[in-house]
Image: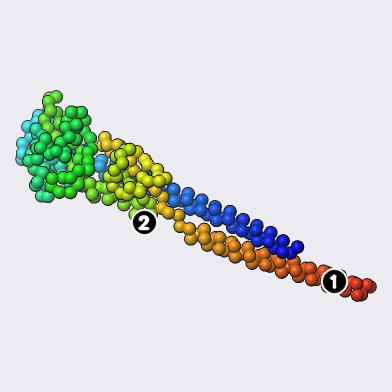
Amino acid sequence: MRVLVALAVFVVGVVLTGVVARLEVRQAESRADEQATAVRSQAAERLVSGAEPTFYITHALDAFVRGHRGSPQAYEIQPYLKVLDEQGRFIRSISLAPGNRISYIEPLVGNEAALGLYFPDNTEQWPAVKAIIDGGQPVLVGPFDLVQGGQGLAYRLPVEVNDIYWGLASTVINADAYFENVISAADGTGVTVGVRVADAPDVLAGSTAAFAGDFTAEGVQVLGADWEVSTVSAPIDSAAEIAIRLVGYAMSIVLAVLVYLFIGSLQRRREATQRLTREFPGLKIVAL
């Protein structure tokens, strides 16, 4: 009898331990999902905010050219570009390309190779540039290899003066620094982050693992470019679950043993009482 009771106590303890352990795992998964959501939102916000200055800079260039009726003077352009260059954190260069040839660029240092570039001669960049010119709308393109070295994202705007195409106003972002800032939203969290063009297989930044398995992607429109940022939760640390199970199983064993011993003690006391009653019929025994 006492074996069955002790075994029942042990089984109940094991079941309760399993329930508590599963609750801990679910809570850990919930915390991990919340953290991944927070990282994804922050990464998406950094995608937008990091590129936002290029919008104002490029449109300021457009207004500058049109304000000078398409004939700004060189001595006016370079100081104006210099002022604009100081407005963005990830700006690699700001340029004007009348007739599709880069004639003005800031800063010049580090971008010398881009000065004089005629876009139709650049087989990598020209298709995207032509599409922008034909569409008549500015858009962020890239990343692509810059002729001056490195990777860039370019927000290009076709400038029109008196409804006639004049050339391009462009602001180029340092793609490496820009995306590094986005991915760093996950630093110290264990969350995997990735950025890609919407529904495209190639990853622009981060890890391809962010788009594998059970991932959650958030669409982000950055200056006309449709991107996705995805996160995968950090692996769940099983240490807490293991600790709960070990402690729970140990307590179940100890409790089962105590119950076994306690029932055994009661049985021995009852047997002793019965034996005394048989041997001394008139003896009054007070149960303790």
- Report the side of 230 relative to 281 (left or right): left
Which residue in the rendered view is the most extreme toward the right?
282
Going by the numbered disc 2, the residue's amino acid type is Gly
Q: Earlier in the sequence, mark 2 or mark 1?
A: 2
Give the secondary structure at mark 2.
loop
- Report the side of 200 relative to 36 (left or right): left
65 or 28: which is nearer to us?
28
129 or 213: which is nearer to us?
213
Q: Residue at x 8, y 39 (%)?
A: 103
Q: Residue at x 65, y 61 (%)?
A: 10
Circle on res. 101: none
Q: Residue at x 57, y 63 (%)?
A: 247
Going by the numbered disc 1, the residue's amino acid type is Thr
- The answer to whether any part of residue 167 appears in the image is yes
Report which residue position mark 1 lands on. Answer: 273
The quadrant in which the N terminus is found is: bottom right
The quadrant in which the C terminus is found is: bottom right
